[in-house]
Amino acid sequence: KQEVTQIPAALSVPEGENLVLNCSFTDSAIYNLQWFRQDPGKGLTSLLLIQSSQREQTSGRLNASLDKSSGRSTLYIAASQPGDSATYLCAVPLFMYSGGGADGLTFGKGTHLIIQP
Amino acid sequence: NAGVTQTPKFQVLKTGQSMTLQCAQDMNHEYMSWYRQDPGMGLRLIHYSVGAGITDQGEVPNGYNVSRSTTEDFPLRLLSAAPSQTSVYFCASSYGKNEKLFFGSGTQLSVL
């Protein structure tokens, strides 16, 4: 069964720092990987989706990389701001089919990020 | 464009009661799914649907029923609520199965 682990569980840094959040998964045969952001009491917002054939995706100050062979992904946040404070989750497909395709997502437990002003 | 709308936002039930959590999306998405989020367990998939009339079980389907009669709506039914179903429930949708997922704001359910 696919398992997703995120390290660290919590992180607190001063504003302006560049930081890296880590995600690892046990089965490297993934279809894609998504990074999400969750604010307290809210739903999840998809930040970046990386297909299995891609090495990285960028959106503004966010850059996500994917290394399928080692079962790892990183989310790089440049020049962090207090508004970046949230929980960040990564997710990979839950059900993978031998004929191709996938269904559902399995999530890591997230990294709770606090950016100090 | 409201996105994914869930109702109610909060609900308290007694053990054995039934209820339906509503989910609607206005993005013409084919794929819809339900997750529950519990402290220490993360998000887990309950049921999902790849289109109207088609549903399938996720990781934790027991105690929940779903149906998909229209593209827009995907309600989640609890037939006989149990304290173990106390959780935050999220509905999500995407254009296709493996595409960017859009989440609703969640329903916080407590079963006493």
Image (cartoon, coloured by chain):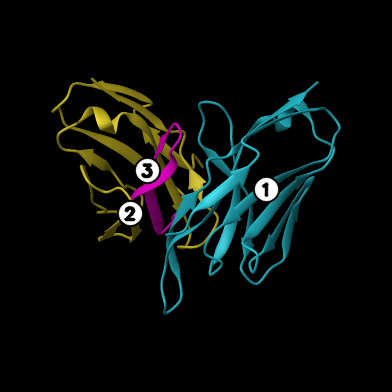
Chain colours: A cyan, B yellow
Question: What residue appears at the point 71 percent right and 49 percent down from the top-left corner?
Answer: A75
Q: Magenta stretch: residue A51 in it?
A: no
Which range is magenta?
B28-46
Q: Is residue A48 above or below residue A87?
A: below
Disc 3 vs disc 2: which is toward the camera?
Answer: 2
Query: Which numbered circle lies on residue B104?
Result: none
In the rendered structure, the residue with mark 2 lies on which chain? Answer: B
Quarter of the image for residue A99 reads: bottom left
Label 3, secondary structure: give it.
strand
Q: Specify which label sits upstream in the sequence, 3 or 2.
A: 3
Type of amino acid at the residue the image marks with label 1: Asn
Query: Which numbered circle lies on residue B24?
Result: 3
Question: What residue appears at the point 46 percent right and 52 percent down from the top-left corner?
Answer: A106
Are callouts 1 and 2 both on one chain? no
Question: What residue appears at the point 19 percent right and 31 percent down from the top-left corner?
Answer: B81
Disc 1 vs disc 2: which is toward the camera?
Answer: 1
Residue neighbourhood size for the residue with mark 1, other residues' Cα within 10 Å, grouped as few (<14), some (14–19), many (≥20): many
Q: Nearer the viewer, residue A60 or B13?
A: B13
Q: Which residue is mark 2?
A: B58
Q: Is residue A74 above or below residue B42?
A: below
Q: Which residue is mark 1?
A: A22
